[in-house]
Image (spheres, coloured by chain):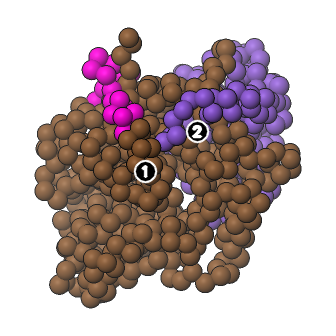
Amino acid sequence: MEKNNITISKAVVFKSDNIDTDKIIPARFLKAVNRGDFGDKLFCDLRTNPNFCINQYTGNRKILIAGNNFGCGSSREHAVWALYDYGFRVIIATGFADIFKNNAYNNGLCPLIVSQKCVDELAETAVKNKDSMFEVNIESQYIKNYETNTIYNFDIEQFRKECLINGFDNTSWLLSMKDDIIKYETTRNQKYL
Amino acid sequence: MKCKTLFDKIWDNHIVKTIENGPEIIFIDREYIHEVTSPTAFETLRNRNIKVLMPNRITAVCDHNVPTHNRKRPVDDPLSEKQLSTLEKNCKDFNIDFYNLEHEYNGIVHVIGPELGLTRPGMTIVCGDSHTSTHGALGCIAFGIGTSEVENVTASQCLLQYKPLQMNIIVEGKLKDGVTSKDLALYILAKYGTDFGTKHFIEFSGPVISEMSIEARMTLCNMSIEMGARGGIIAPDIKTFEYVKNTPLSPKDKDFEDALSYWKTLYTDKDAKFDKTIKINASEIIPMITFGTNPGMGIPITEQIPDKTDDKKFVRALRYMNFKAGETLIGKKIDYVFIGSCTNGRIEDFRICAQILKGKKIAENVTVWIVPGSFSVLKQIKNEGLDKIFKDSGAEMRLPGCSACLGMNADKIPEGKYCVSTSNRNFEGRQGSGSRTLLASVYTATACAIAGKVVY
């Protein structure tokens, strides 16, 4: 997993609530057997509309300002891969669907939960001037709006934070506990589980 | 002693270790894998030269993109064939039990797990599929995971998890005749929306839940993910024990007795605390149907589509469905009816369907797909002679699979067509590009099939 700590970028605004993973990447693109590149499949049915948000920007944008309950529905990790491969590193919203949130952390995509006020203000800036710059600093836990010179702090679990900024993945973590895991299973004496 | 919820008891029994200032390492008793969300996990394991730690705790099945008209290999779609053969190879290489296309145990993963007795009370169960929540109906902690987590579990039989919040939905009163747990789920969704369960595990309890069959409980827990919850759970009772006892792979004899004495401890203590509690009066529920593009956009079938025309998403959804605010769905012409999926693809569902279809014909304008959730369900359908009723009515019975629940196999609803579906999601394009889904119970869907339009 690549490290993710400081992101300085322009932002894309897609402030619609309950964006489901079928919208992020439709099921017909889930047929790959390799990780590959899913970036061009991101929101592909919505992108046919020239007015759709990401069609209005050029260049690489790493920050997505989203609506509430982003990533609901199917567990497909392809949704996170599509966002990541497209170039996003941070998604800012008032809330995420739980499976999506875990998937995001596990791929080095940072799902930041902030207040409605923060989302509204960031979105307002980004819409008003499409070239507005923002900084997300995971280690120091702040978002900076360079346009208005405003700083917003956010909460993130310590463990998640360390994994993101160091690029630790869970499989390595868990395998380092292998002996404890095997001991747990052999000593609990519950054959029916 | 501290009072515990059912969820606490199972969770605490599965903590291998707690990381300071971090998540817990939770042992997973059973992992189900399928062809869509597992291949890249195995790819990573191979690349990193990691072995599968406990292959006997993993069960594989193909269901998402299997053809339902025949099981001929290779399947028509080369990409689907590639996923199927990749799963085959991965299971062989890593020594994992695999119920392939033709296997008598094949079917939708959330149908076969419980019916085989692989899903049992007190377990922790995961699968790279959001509807893993279904299994919670048997009194276990079951939830959907992403592919990285499939990789975690396959490598270590564990997951790093933060303990979720807990919600209790108490269902009181009595469901009216012809009103099912599907209607209850759609009612809860219409009332509370699709994200009220976020960060929570939901325990469903109360007299209405106790009354329900295990199949009906599975339908409800299946839909808990649509409420935004990580999963649903229902305390196991005598019905659960009987259900599990009669499955082929459940523990037998002394092992079963040992299990039973443990299972009987699995209930929420009287004074245990939940983070949130909701009470539902089931007596006021009538059959529900959705009119929009998320499962929360449902109404009692006799009511009018609400008017929220100041809400952009609402307007977009109605435009997609070609419905108008204020109109009723009753009498709307439909094109397809789909009976099946991990939500409503069990024997009880097909008995209900057959009971209504018996001696009747489906309307000429409607194509009806009846898709059993597994070969075992199919066998029961045949044993009970239900297949003849379906055939005589003009409905088409298919082979088991996820089928028209999601646009991943050949069973797609064409653009602009209406499908009354017993599945779980009515998202834009879910059943095929441009398809229009009306979610409903088996009763409602079957009645609509006969009428050729929305009725109840």
Count of numbered circles in the view: 2
Q: Residue placed farthest to the top in the image?
A: B1
Chain B colour is brown
For marks 1 and 2, give the one nearer the viewer. 1
- Residue bounds of the magenta highlight: B260-278
Report the amino acid beneath label 1. Answer: Lys
Q: Is residue B114 left or right of residue A39?
A: left
Q: Please determine whether, in this image, residue B24 is positioned above or below residue B42.
A: above
Q: Which residue in the protein does label 2 denote?
A: B28
Residue with the mark numbered 1: B252
| Numbered badge on residue B164 | none
Q: Quadrant of residue B372?
A: bottom left
Residue B413 vs residue B26, the one in the foreground: B26
- Please provide percent x and percent y for residue B95: 71, 57
Q: Amino acid at mark 2?
A: Ile
Q: Are marks 1 and 2 on the same chain?
A: yes
Residue B262 is a magenta residue = yes
Residue B241 % position (x, y): 33, 46
Closer to the chain start, of discs 1 and 2, is: 2
* The N terminus of chain B: image quadrant: top left
Q: For the residues marked 1 and 2, what is the alpha-carbon distance in whole angstroms?
A: 22 Å
The chain in purple: A
Decide whether residue B194 is among the magenta residues.
no
